[in-house]
Image (cartoon, grey):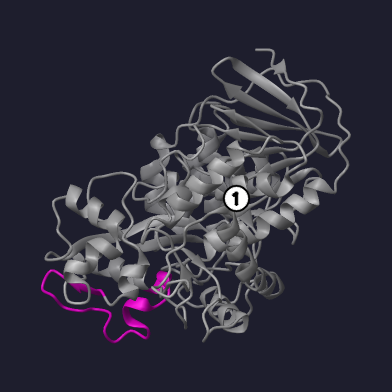
Amino acid sequence: MTPDIHDIGGAPVIVGAGIAGLMTALHLAPHPVVLLSSTPLGTEASSTLAQGGLAASVGPDDSTDLHLTDTLAAGDGLCNEAMARRVVEALPRAVDHLIRLGVPFDCTFNGTLRLGLEAAHSRRRIVHAAGDATGRELLRVLVAVVRRTPSIIIMEGMTARRLVVAEGGIVGVLAVGCDGVVALPTRRVVLATGGIGGLFRDTTNPLASFGHGLALAACAGAELANLEFVQFHPTALDTARRPMPLVSEAVRGEGALLVDEHGHRFLADTPGAELAARDVVARAISDQLAAGHRVFLDARNCLGARFAKRFPVIEAACRQAGIDPAVDPIPVRPAAHYHMGGVAVDVEGRSSVPGLWACGEVACTGLHGANRLASNSLAEAVATSAWVATSVAGTCMGWQWPRLPTMVPLRPDPSPIRQLVSDALGIIRNGKALANAVETLLPIAVGGKAAADPALVALLMAIAALRREESRGSHSRSDFTGRDAVALPSRLTLCTGFENAVALSWQTSERSC
C-alpha cells in the first residue's frame, strides 16, 4: 500500500498523547507541532490511571536534597545522580506551572497544598488532585489547554507504525488511520508512548501498552537502556478485571496494613514495613501468594468511614468488586506497573538517532535507576518535557523524503505472548526461563504477524534480564541472588539483541544434539 504523503512543513511529530506528549506539545507552542494519538485525547493513556500524584519538595520541612536522597536510595545504585538532581530541583516550579494551567491540586483549609506520604519518601511531598484521581485531573486540564492551542495539530485515531530513517537520521513517520497509511515527512520525532505493562497478564496499564515506542525506536536503530527493570506495584486490586485497578500506595501512607487471610501482618519486621520500597513489598506479597496465602490491605482502623472521601476512585473500584473498604480488607496482589528502562536519552531527551527524542515512561533518563521512587513518574514527565521541547525547537527544520517503505506492520496484538512474558519476566526471574523465553520469542519477533512488535520488545527485555547476573532493585534473579559491587547500566540495540538471541539459540541447539 502506497502511503498518502501529508506535507506538515517539517513540523515535529509527537507520538503519544499522555501527560508527557501533551506537556511537550504545550511547551513547543507557538511553534507548530503535530500530535499523534491512537485514541481520542484523554483516553487510553496510562496517565489517567495515576492515583498517587506528583512528588515535589514543596513542604516546609522538605528540600530538594532530601527528595534526591530518597530517589537515589530507591534506585539502588543505578540512578544518574546529575539527572536526578536536575529533575527534583525543577519540580517545585513545574507544580507552579501546572497550577497556572488550571490543575486543581488538593489544598488544606488555609490554601496550602495538601501533601501525601508514599513508600520510601522521608517526607510528605506527594501533590495530588481529587484525592486519588491526579492523573485523570492532569489529563483533563492539559487536553483542554491543548485543544485551545492553535499551533498544535491534533491527529486522533492515528497510530505510528514505523519511523523512517535515511542517512542515519529520522526523516519521517509512517502512521495508520481509518483512511489508510499516512506518511509525515519530518526530521523531528518525540516518542511519548508510555510503558510496557500490557505485555503482562497482571497489569495496571492499558492492555495496549506493550512498548510501542520501544519497538519504533529499536527498529530505527536507537540504543535502549535498562530494559530488565520492571516495577510491579505491590497492591493492585485482586479481581478478574483487566487492567487491574490500582490501590494507591497513598493508602498505605495513611496507615493501612498488609495482612494475610489470618490477619497476620507479615511485613511488621521489615525495615519500612508497609512503606518499604516497592520492590521489597512486591516480593514479600509474591512470597505470601506463592505459599498459598491470600493478601489483603486493611484500612479499616486508619481510615474506616473516611476511605470514600480520601480515595473515591479506589472506593468505587472496590464497590464494583463487592468490597466496602470501610469495613472489609481489600484483596491485593502485585501487577506490572512501570518500566524504568526505555530509550536511552541525554539530558535534553535526545536518543542515539539524530532527530529522535523520547519523553516520559518510554525514555530512560537515569532518574529512576533500578526501582522508581513512588510518584516520580508524573514528576519526570512534567519536568523533562520542557527540556525536550526546548531541544526540539532549537533543531534545524529542514527535511527530505526518501524512498518510502511499501509495507507497514500489522496492528500489534500482545495477547499471544502475555503468559510467556508473565512467567519469564515476573517478579522473580531465572536464567533457564529467560533463555527459553528468548528462544520462543525470536521467531515470533521476526514472523511478521500481529504479535511481532510486542514479541520484539519482550525479546529485548529478556536478553537484558539474562545478561544482568545479579539481583538489584526490581530485577530479582533466583539463580543470582547477590548484588554486584559496582552498579552498571545496561545498553542494547536491535542489532545486538538479535545477535544475542541467535547465539543463544545456537548454543541451545548444539546442547540438544
Where residue 332 sits in the image (x, y, percent)? 25, 61
**Residue most toward the front?**
110
Q: Position of residue 474 (x, y in %)?
A: 47, 67
The answer to whether residue 354 shows anywhere in this view is: yes
* Placement of 132 over or under 406, stated as above or below: below
Q: Place residue 276 in its image quadrant.
A: bottom left
Write the residue at 21% across / 71% down. Answer: 299
Instruction: Tell me the kind of residue under disc 1.
Output: Ala
Q: Name the residue at 75% across, 38% down.
A: 12
Q: Horizontal and vertical percent for residue 504? A: 57, 49
Q: Residue at x 28, y 80 (%)?
A: 267
Which residue is the site of mark 1?
Answer: 20
Q: Secondary structure at mark 1?
A: helix
Q: Nearer the viewer, residue 74 or 158?
A: 158
The residue depicted at 31 percent of the width and 44 percent of the height is: 242
User: Where the N terminus falls, by quadrant?
Assistant: top right
**Where are the magenta residues, as a range?**
256-280
Count of labels shown? 1
Crowding near pointer 1: few (<14 within 10 Å), some, many (20+)?
Answer: many
**218 relative to 311 in the view: left or right:** right
Whether residue 285 sits left or right of residue 301 in the image: it is: right
- Left or right of residue 185: residue 205: left
**What secondary structure predominates along the stretch shown in magenta?**
loop
Question: Which image quadrant for residue 185?
Answer: top right
Magenta-span inclusion, residue 259 = yes
Up the image or down, 316 lies above or below 99; here it is above
- In magenta segment, residue 63: no
